[in-house]
Image (tube, rainbow, N blue to C red):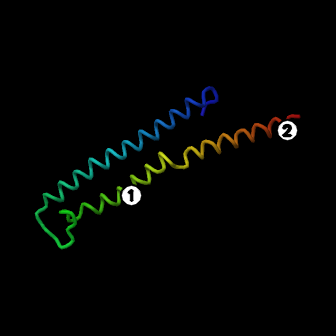
Amino acid sequence: MTRDNPALDRARKRAKELRGFYSHLLTYVLVSTLLVFIDLADSSVTATEFLGLSWAYWPILGWGVAVVIHAINTFFGFNTWEERKTEELYEQEKQKELIGRY
C-alpha cells in the first residue's frame, strides 16, 4: 500500500477481489454447462442417475462448494478484518516510534 492514497489502494484491491470471484463464477457456470451437455450426450444410463445425469453432478457439486466458499470470503470474509487489523497495528507501531523518539 502506498501512503499517498490508501483509499485508492483499498479500492483497487477490492476491485481485484471482485474480478477474481466473478471470473471464477463465470468459469464455473460455463464448465458446468459443458459437463451437463457431455453427460446428457452420453447414451449409457446407469443406476446412479440423478436428475438425468450419470456423473456430472459430482464435479459440479464439488466445484460449487469452492465457489460458495470464494463468495463468502469475497463478500463476507475476513478481508475487511485483515485490512482493519493491519491499519490498527500500523497505528500502534507509529505510536511506539513516536514514544521511542522522546
Earlier residue among tags 1 and 2 = 1
Amino acid at circle 1: Val
Name the residue furthest bottom. 47
**Spatial separation of the CA atoms under disc 1 and disc 2:** 50 Å
Residue 49 coordinates in the image, percent (x, y)? 20, 68
Q: Quadrant of the N terminus?
A: top right
Which numbered circle lies on residue 17?
A: none
Amino acid of disc 2: Gly
Residue for point 18% across, 63% down: 52
Residue topped by disc 1: 65
Q: Which residue is mark 2?
A: 100
Disc 1 is placed on an element classified as helix
Write down the quadrant of residue 23 in the picture: top left
Q: Is residue 63 above or below residue 9?
A: below
Quadrant where the image shows the C terminus: top right
For disc 2, the neighbor class at 10 Å (few under 14, some 14 to 19, many from 20) is few
Q: Where does the image place residue 36, in percent across and percent down from the top left? A: 21, 55
Q: Position of residue 22 (x, y in %)?
A: 38, 42
Task: Residue at 58%, 30% (x, y): give it.
Answer: 7
